Amino acid sequence: MSDIRYQNLLAALTLFAVLASCSPGPQAGGGIGGTGRLTSVASGPITGFGSVFVSGTEYETTNTSMMVDGQPGSQRDLKKGMLVRVKATVTERSDTDAPLRTAETLVYEDTLEGVVQSMTPTGSHLVVLGQSVTITPATLIDARISGGTVLNLVPGRDLVEISGFVMGDGVIRATLIDLKTLDATATPDYQVKGLIANHRVDQRTFEIGGLTVDYRNSLLQDLPGPAGGVWDGLLVDVIGTQVSSETGSSPRLRLTASRVRLEGLGSSDSEDAVVEGSVTRVLSPGNFFLGNLQVVSDARTVFQGGTNADILVGVHLEVHGRLVGGVMTAAEVELEDADLHGAVMQVLSLGHFFLGNVQVLTNAETIFEGGTINDIVVGVHLEVYGSVVDGTVSATKVEFERVTSLSEISHPETSPATNSADHTVP
């Protein structure tokens, strides 16, 4: 992305932060040195219950206001693996070093909802609404899905709700996959979260992965004005009720949007912010983005599992820090793993190559799927899992990605769906 595009993007996100700071919301007073309480925001997956654990941290939820998929909900509606946003107060306790975190609000929304288009033979990926969904050993699968495997989903028929981390370029790393059932006469509410690309102001369209979004009659929320290319690179949440197949030499899926909203934490200021996510953009060492959230580190930032040099696009992080004006200053950064997608740009030696501009090393324990170490040549598309050491990814698994044509994505060969006047599913 060009410097001008980055400047436009930063300007758009700054405007969003200003708008968020002007919006009403629950506030706790004083900070830890005054009232003994401070405000907190968190974003991450539900990892347990009792109260509710988000990214391993417990939140008391006795009086929490909850919204689940846009409707008032309760803890009974929550599941492990759901990515949620929490606003809370943090109170010191005299009997323990662990503070009490009391959730005021908890919000859950699907990352992706749509009809399954296809899956890989190994069940490691799904395609839904033109998005490539990565399934890992940590992905939780709905018990209603036969055998607990996505291989038993039926393309063109089964409607799924997916929670996960947006990796960029139409890739989502799933934390939870649910099967959704509808009455025969009901129309699905399709939903997708992703990074905008190829925004065309004159046509009122943009792309998210293999999906074209038509927003000409859509409600736009928190987005800057569309002129000047400022939308490209923004993380948005799109809802629509009509999906169709575009015609032409390279057909795509097309979603007619009813609402497009800029994604955010729901607050631009917090003394205690905890965000788990994947790096979607790196501006410079110590200055990067998790979706729309800009994170900066300084000399006081503590790194676990790596250093500043190991923060690459696709690396999974948990960041703790202070949020001011929509920018997070990191007190602690935990590097968890890397999930990289792209084409091999250069092969240095057997098992040593560049994926994009990231150097990758394999070893005797690296697992290969869909090919062998000898098949790694320039131009091959791979997904690489591993850990980052001194800016180089040590691969634990390498998957050879079959580049599916848009025609195949739009028209899967198995179990075609029945079209209706209101919605056409792939």
Image (cartoon, grey):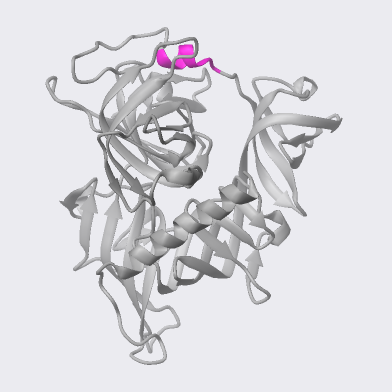
Q: Residue, x 38% and y 87% (percent of image)?
A: 95
Q: How many marks?
A: 0
In the image, is 189 to the left or to the right of 309? Answer: left
Q: In terms of depth relative to the viewer, which is nearer, 196 or 28?
A: 196
Q: From this view, report whether residue 368 is shown above or below residue 276.
A: above
Residue drawn at 22 percent across, 65 percent down: 64
Q: Is-magenta flag for residue 261?
A: no
Q: Which residues are magenta?
A: 404-410
Where is 233 relative to 389, above or below? above
Who's the residue at 44% across and 40% down the image?
Answer: 194
**Horizontal and vertical percent position of residue 198:** 50, 33
Residue 149 screen position, x and y as percent: 41, 27
Question: Quarter holding the C terminus?
Answer: top left
**Residue 333 horizontal/vertical position (percent):** 59, 64
Task: Locate residue 269, reporting x and y percent.
Answer: 40, 72
Whether residue 297 is visible to the viewer of this picture, yes or no, is: yes
Would you identify the image quadrant in which residue 179 lies?
top left
Towards the viewer: 116 or 228: 228
Q: Residue at x 43, y 43 (%)?
A: 164
Please state, as top left, top right, bottom left or bottom right, where the N terminus lies in the image. Answer: top right
Return the residue found at the far bottom. Answer: 34
Q: Is residue 267 visible?
A: no
- Asked if the stretch drawn in magenta spans residue 408, the answer is yes
Main SS, magenta region, reads: helix
